């Protein structure tokens, strides 16, 4: 496949780059962290979205190498930010299952000098379905090292409440589909409130993704969520803009 060959070349030629989107704490409206979102700088096609190439990277197994690059680069970037700012990295199921995953997390932390407590790994619900025991062990190992674990896109997959109890999550990220109508529709707000309260009872922080408007923010605040993320605060931005954003917003 042409795209597969191009992906391999992109990795070899260092053509991936990271953009970052702030995570905001609602108690003081400060930035608490940055989510790394990978892009591919293509010579003809311009900036290619991960929505286009991550699925292929997962199919071909290239996600393991791409993911390792993302982890390393995200930690190197975070090393230049204030100590209180964490960095969130998306981890594919295949990557989490790989036998060298814990080692590559430790390597990224050690070579950047970033403390484990500043790293958040975002995993999706599909991780909970396959190889459960192995994934569970990996997550517990990482957590013992001080790394935090977030459940990404919550509410879009098969997550059952029992998974929240079984797996060691620090944060739930409610998928942006719940936000779209939450200012207009009371059910969406009620769902957010229910997740926040479930999370609180398990000692898990709740973040709401995809916040675009002030009315949405007001609802989310009223429902008790601790953190938000979305275009209202900032779209994902290239890494060279992040230091200035942190100075202005932190
Ligand atoms: O930022 P954007 O809208 O383009 O992201 C699209 C999708 O790609 C999101 O679901 C996001 O989680 C995923 N994604 C972005 N960066 C990474 C990454 O580094 N690794 C993995 N596995 N997924 C990523
Ligand atoms: O799947 P994940 O949550 O990791 O990826 C986040 C995705 O959501 C990225 O593609 C990012 O560009 C996108 N995103 C971030 N904020 C907003 C927002 O406020 N509105 C919409 N529609 N998309 C957003
Ligand atoms: Mn994410
Ligand atoms: Na998400």
Image: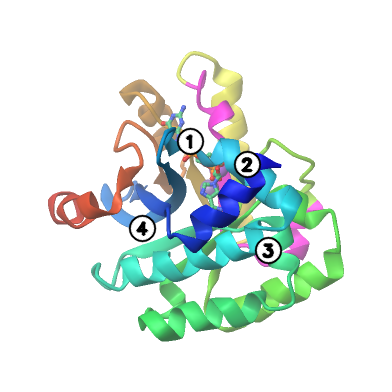
Residue drawn at (63%, 78%), measured in percent from left and top?
A: 102
Badge 4 density bin: few <14, some 14–19, many ≥20, Cα 10 Å: many
Res 223 label: 1
Badge 3 density bin: few <14, some 14–19, many ≥20, Cα 10 Å: many
Disc 3 from disc 4: Cα separation: 22 Å
Q: Is residue 216 left or right of residue 198?
A: left
* Residue 224 percent location from the top left of the image: 46, 42
Res 3 label: 2
Position of the N terminus by quadrant: top right
Disc 2 from disc 1: Cα separation: 44 Å
Residue drawn at (61%, 82%), measured in percent from left and top?
A: 103
* Residue 202 percent location from the top left of the image: 64, 60
Does mark 3's beta carbon lie closer than 8 Å to ligand 1? yes
Position of the C terminus by quadrant: bottom left
Identify residue for label 4: 33
Residue 164 appears in the rendering: no
Q: Secondary structure at mark 2?
A: helix
Give the residues drawn in magenta, as a range: 162-182
Earlier-in-chain disc, 1 versus 4:
4
Badge 1 density bin: few <14, some 14–19, many ≥20, Cα 10 Å: some
Above or below, comparing residue 195 to residue 244 in the picture: above
Identify residue for label 3: 95
Earlier-in-chain disc, 3 versus 2:
2
């Amino acid at each position: 496949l042409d795209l597969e060959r191009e992906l391999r070349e992109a990795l070899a030629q260092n053509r991936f780059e990271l953009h970052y989107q702030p995570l905001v704490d609602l108690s003081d409206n400060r930035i608490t962290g940055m989510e790394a979102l990978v892009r591919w700088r293509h010579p003809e096609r311009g900036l290619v979205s991960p929505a286009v190439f991550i699925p292929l990277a997962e199919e071909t197994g290239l996600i393991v190498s791409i993911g390792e690059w993302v982890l390393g680069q995200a930690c190197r970037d975070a090393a230049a930010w204030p100590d209180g700012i964490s960095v969130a990295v998306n981890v594919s199921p295949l990557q989490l299952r790989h036998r060298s995953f814990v080692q590559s997390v430790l390597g990224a932390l050690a070579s950047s000098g970033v403390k484990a407590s500043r790293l958040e790994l975002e995993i999706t619900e599909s991780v909970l379905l396959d190889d459960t025991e192995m994934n569970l062990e990996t997550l517990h190992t990482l957590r013992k090292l001080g790394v935090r674990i977030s459940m990404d896109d919550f509410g879009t997959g098969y997550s059952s409440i029992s998974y929240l109890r079984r797996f060691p999550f620090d944060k739930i990220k409610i998928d942006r589909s719940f936000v779209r109508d939450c200012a207009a529709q009371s059910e969406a707000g009620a769902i957010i409130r229910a997740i926040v309260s479930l999370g609180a009872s398990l000692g898990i922080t709740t973040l709401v993704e995809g916040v675009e408007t002030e009315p949405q923010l007001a609802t989310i605040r009223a429902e008790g969520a601790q953190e938000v993320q979305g275009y209202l605060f900032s779209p994902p931005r290239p890494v060279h803009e992040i230091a200035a954003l942190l100075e202005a917003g932190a």
